[in-house]
Amino acid sequence: MPYVLVSQASRAELDAVADARWTAIVAERPELDSAVGLQRQLVERVIALRATLDASRLPRLSLPGRYIAAKLARGVPALAGEPIPFPVAILTETLLGLCGDLAAGGAGEAAEHIHTQVESGGLDAGSLLAASLSRNQDAIRTGAVHRGLASDLVWLVAELAVGPFAYVLQRTLFAPAGDGPGAAPAGPVATALDGWNQGYCPACGSWPAMAEVVEGHRVLRCSFCAAAWELTTYACVYCGEEGEPFVTAAPDEERKDRRVEVCGSCRGYLKTVDTLALSPFPLLSIGDLETMDLDMAAMEHGYQRPPLKDFATKR
Ligand SMILES: [Zn+2]
Ligand SMILES: [Zn+2]
C-alpha cells in the first residue's frame, strides 16, 4: 500500500541512532565536522519542539475523512489550501532559537538579521510560519527580499520550526490510531491513500527529500512532514517519465547502495539510498547530509530539485 507508517522512536532510540550516524559521517568525511555540529544543535531543537507539541493542547484540525479522501482522489494533498490553526508562540520560540544556532554555526549576520526582524515584529512570525506551513515559496521569498533578508535562510528556519507541527498534523490525519500493532490507517482516508501515486507528499505537497529503499521497497520521504509513501510505478517522481530519459545511476562505482535517479525530460533528480530501516522523524535530515555528494554529482550534471508545486489555491 502506498502510504507507509513509520514507527515513532523513543527519545533514547532517536539519540542513539542519530549519534551513530553523525559519528560515521565525521569518521568518513572529517571536513563535515562543523556541519555535523550545527545539525546536532538544529535536530536537538526540533526534537525538543516535537516533545513540547506532544505535551501541549493543540488547536484542533477538523477535516472529515471523506473530505480528505475526495481531495486525495483529485491528486490534491490533504493540507493544501486549508486554513490551519497552529501554536504561534511555541513555534516562534523555536524559530528564534534556530536563528541563534545558525548565527553561531556559520550563517552569521544573515541569521542574526532574521532573528532581529522576527523579534522586533518587522517580519511577522505568524505570517512567516503560516506561509511555510502552506508551502508558499513565493510569499516567503518576496517577504524576505523586501526586508533585505537571505530568502533561502528564511525558508530554511521557517521550515525547521514548522516541520514538527507538520509532522504531527500528518500523523493525526493519516495515522490517527498511532502506530501500535494493528493501528494501520483505516476508513476512507486509507482507501484514498492506497490510490495515491503522485511524486509529491499526500499530506503537504512537498517533494521527497530522498527515497529510502528498504527490502526492495522504494519509499519516498517527504522533506517537510516526513510522510513515507511508495509509488506503484518506477518513474520520475517529478514528471512521471518512465522511458529512456529516466535513468538510475550510482555516481560511486563502489557504492551501488547510493544512487541518483535523474530525468532527462524535466532535469530533476532524486537521491535513492538502500537502508535497513526508514528514518524516524526528524532524522531524515541526517540522511540528507550523508548523501551530500550525490547532490553534488547530480547538480554537476545539470540536474536540479524542482520548485514546489503550487497548491495554494486548491482545496
Ligand atoms: Zn509532507
Ligand atoms: Zn522528470
Image: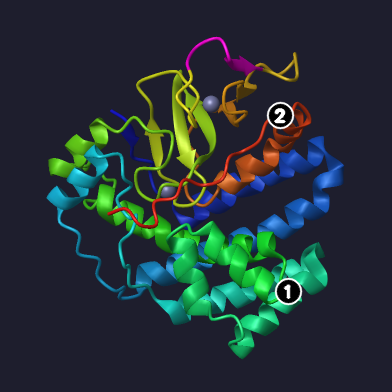
The three-letter amino acid code for the residue at tag 2 is Ala
Check whether the beta carbons of the residues at disc 1 and disc 2 lie within 8 A of each other. no
At numbered mark 2, what does the secondary structure look like: helix, strand or loop? helix
Per the image, is 246 magenta? yes
Q: Give the position of the C terminus as an image quadrant.
A: bottom left
Q: Residue furthest right?
A: 31
Where residue 93 sits in the image (x, y, percent)? 54, 79
- For the point 46% across and 78% down, the residue is 90
Residue on which disc 2 sits: 298
Q: Is residue 71 visible?
A: yes
**In 3D space, how far apart are the residues under numbered discs 1 and 2 (Cα atoms)?**
31 Å
Per the image, is 157 magenta? no
- For the point 38% across and 26% down, the residue is 231
Mark earlier in primary sequence (1, 2):
1
- For the residue with label 1, is its CB less than 8 Å from the closest atom of ligand 1? no
User: Image check: 169 left or right of 210?
Assistant: left
For the rendered model, the colour scheme is rainbow
Q: Give the position of the N terminus as an image quadrant.
A: top left
Give, as a single range, the part of the protein colored magenta: 242-249
Q: Nearer the viewer, mark 1 or mark 2?
A: 1
User: Image check: 297 left or right of 238?
Assistant: right
**Which numbered disc covers residue 148?**
1
Q: In the rendered view, would you say 31 is above or below 232? A: below
Closer to us: 31 or 192: 192
The three-letter amino acid code for the residue at tag 1 is Gly
- For the residue with label 2, is its CB less than 8 Å from the closest atom of ligand 2? no
